[in-house]
Amino acid sequence: MRALQDLQIFVETARQGSLSSVARAMNLTPAATSAAIKRLEHQLAAPLFVRSTRSLRLTKEGEQYLQYCEEALKQLEQGEMLLRSGRQRLQGKLHLSLPSDLGRNLLAPLLDSFMATHPQVELKLQISDHLTNIYHQPVDLVIRYGLPPNSSLIALPLTPNNDRVLCAAPTYLARAGTPKHPQELSQHNCLCFMLADCVHDRWQFNRGEEFISVNVKGDRVADDGDMVHRWALAGCGIAYKSRLDIAADLQQGRLQQLCSDWRGEAAPLNMLLPDRRQLTPLINALRSHLLQHLGTSR
């Protein structure tokens, strides 16, 4: 494809500063590489290089265009790798960091089915609600709700529309009554989650343009989301959980959603990586697998 080759010639010329060097590297004639640059400049109606007898240097327009060309070529390469991976057996090691509740109760079975399809994949799991420093620990990717503060990580959405839900077991509601409005939570035992010594005891809700924030309290706090989930199932109080975490419990009646005319905080689930260059065919295949099944788990 001439258009694609023209972009490749432009990027390589910007890197090497020499049309003749690019021509040798790509097994082309100097005239062919020069014609490719001229075609791009004509198409863009802008000069890409300042030419001299000895060298080339990018114009301001060329510098701006280069970053988009490099990204486009990377995306095309990754797409080609992904298509090839569908025809080849995936193999390799995956080191994942997952949140405790979602990791144990929903993602673990999905990972099992992924590995059954790709038996040459090896898996290493780190399951914890504590934030993983992906830059300093040997982790390929992290799956978390939301984004870490001030993060420069690449976030690939898995369930962008997920939210938090007020819920409780029928046994608790039979004993303590059912709140009709989030403000009534002050009269109930609320099961709180703690992260990095910070207790999440301020729960937020909205109904259309109306927003409220409620301070809650209770007799149980845990730094493990799965523990809060278990307490809710045992009828110990009211929890404020990700809808993904409790979808099966709501469907089967083990938990009931409360104040359903109010919506809880957004809780988008993301796959986090430090760099797009780490999007290997194996990781792309895993993301496709999760996207396919998480969409039916809500």
Image (cartoon, rainbow, N blue to C red):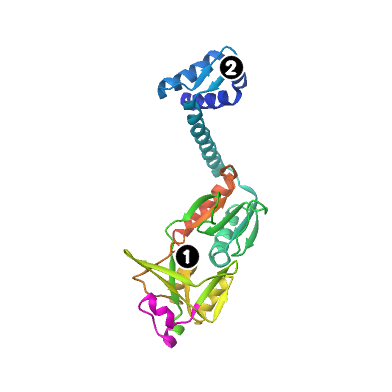
Which residue corresponds to mark 2? 55
Tell me which amino acid carries mark 1: Leu
Asked whether residue 185 is drawn in magenta, I would say yes
Circles 1, 2 touching at the beta carbon (< 8 Å): no
Secondary structure, mark 1, is helix
Q: Which residues are magenta?
A: 173-190
Q: How many marks?
A: 2
Q: What is the x, y in percent for residue 286?
A: 55, 52
Taking the view exactly as shown, the residue that stands out farthest to the bottom is 175
Asked if 175 appears above or below 91 in the picture, the reply is below
Q: Nearer the viewer, residue 288 or 232?
A: 232
The label shown at residue 244 is 1
Judge left or right: residue 243 versus residue 227: left
Secondary structure, mark 2, is loop
Q: What is the x, y in percent for residue 17?
A: 59, 21
Asked whether residue 159 is drawn in magenta, I would say no
Judge left or right: residue 177 versus residue 227: left
